[in-house]
Image: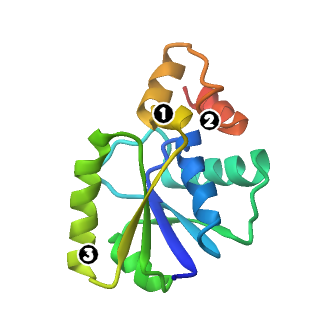
Amino acid sequence: MSKVAIYPGTFDPITFGHIDVIKKSLRLFEKIIVAVSDGENKKYLFDADERIEIVKKALFSDLKLNKNKIMVISFSSLTTDLCKKYKSNIILRGLRAASDFEYEFQLAGMNRKLNNNIETLFLMSDVENQIISSKFVKEIIKLGGDIKKFTTKSTIKSLKEKI
């Protein structure tokens, strides 16, 4: 089994769903690389540097997760190139609902075609977090709603400052 796994995503912002995937993967791998996408094809609320800081505060300050087991980076390359760079053959992806599966299945297939040594491992967040999406978290806070059940204290603070 690979000792390093790559968990790519936009994390705009990080949610308890993402955090569930990270916590579960820590039981399976020695090191998790949380790779914050800096792709240009999406409109982000936070830029990549802000998202990296938000993820770090959520994981290391709010939740006190082990800094030696998690690395948070930015990337704008193919995920398969990132795997090569960090000598990993595992891409982690979170699944919330059946609606995620089709897109994730296609993405895993494309990554496999790009590098047939790479496997995609799908992890589900806990039931209470499966409905959470970054999009909904941003919408709820913009409309003045309470998002304590969806993300960490420092992430809420960053969202309130931005909005």
To which residue does mark 3 refer? 112
For the residues bearing labels 2 and 1, Cβ distance under 8 angstroms:
yes
Viewer-side residue, 27 vs 138:
27
Amino acid type, residue under disc 1 in the picture: Ile
Marks 2 and 3, how far apart at CA: 32 Å
**Residue occupying the far top of the picture:** 144
Tell me the SS state at disc 1.
loop
To which residue does mark 1 refer? 132
Q: Residues within 10 Å of mark 1 (few under 14, many from 20)?
A: some
Marks 1 and 3, how far apart at CA: 28 Å
Tell me the SS state at disc 3.
helix
Viewer-side residue, 92 vs 123:
123
Tell me, yes or no, if residue 159 can be seen here: yes
Tell me, yes or no, if residue 15 can be seen here: no
Of circles 2 and 3, the one toward us is 3
Viewer-side residue, 46 vs 92:
92
State the residue at coordinates (58%, 63%).
Answer: 25
State the residue at coordinates (32%, 71%).
Answer: 78
Q: Is residue 44 above or below residue 82?
A: above
Amino acid type, residue under disc 3 in the picture: Arg
Q: Residues within 10 Å of mark 3 (few under 14, many from 20)?
A: some
To which residue does mark 2 refer? 151
